[in-house]
Image (cartoon, grey):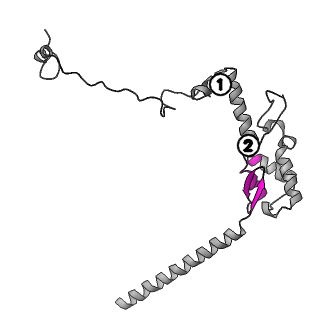
Amino acid sequence: MVTEKKEERGKEKKGKEKKDIAKTEHKESNAQTHRIVRLLEYALNGDRKVSAAMRDIKGIGYRIASILSKKLNTGDKLLADLDADEISHLETALKNVNTFVPSWMINHKNDQFTGTNLHPVGTDLELAVKNDIEFMQKIKTYKGIRHTQGQPVRGQRTRTSFRKGKSVGVVKKKSAPAKEGAKKSAAPGGKTAKK
């Protein structure tokens, strides 16, 4: 009985070792096939479909990625399977998204400086948002003032929310030693006696 249990335990350990070896081999094979494609200063996973990989770029969401992949006829291709010509077409399409999508899908309509519809992507989008906030702060609009103060901009309540690190709150003062006259008139329940 005891020897049978030991043999079973030995078999279980051998089985676990085989599974561990298989897992490490699988990880090594994935590391070899993992390909990276550079698009607009982003390192994208080449083992993903084109529309899914594009969504890692800031400013490109699901709908815009699906529209661009349909317009460029990439279909279900993986990003790494595209040749250099297709990648260059994809990059120009990402730089000029406003020519492929309707105006209501653009993220920077009626630019305040140029008056045109733009769709900045990646670091251009981050820079455009930063410039817009700085401009609002400069001309002292309500939103600009709220940004400067570090308060919520879109009308949220501030009584209970957004309180992190703002103030300590109510702090009790240390009670000073009581006067002798006050001690004599104090009732046993802690209340002062009526006169």
The residue shown at (17%, 19%) is 178
From the top left corner, tell me how far across and down residue 124 is, in percent.
76, 40
User: Quarter-wise, where is residue 110 in the image?
Assistant: top right
User: Is 101 on the left-hand or right-hand side of 172?
Assistant: right
* Residue on which the image places disc 1: 144
Figure check: 86 above or below 118: below
The residue singled out by tag 2 in the image is 123
Tell me residue 126's x, y (percent).
Answer: 71, 39
- Looking at the rendering, in which quadrant would you find the N terminus? bottom left
Label 1 amino acid? Gly
Q: Is residue 149 left or right of residue 185?
A: right
Q: Examine the rendered structure and indicate whether residue 195 appears above or below residue 130.
A: above
**Picture quadrant of residue 5:** bottom left
- Residue at 74% across, 39% down: 125
> Does 173 appear in magenta?
no
As helix, strand or loop, the secondary structure at mark 2 comes to helix
Report the Cα–Cα distance between label 1 and label 2: 22 Å
Kind of residue sitting beneath label 2: Thr
Task: Based on the picture, tell me whether residue 51 belongs to the magenta stretch.
Answer: yes
Q: Which residues are magenta?
A: 36-63
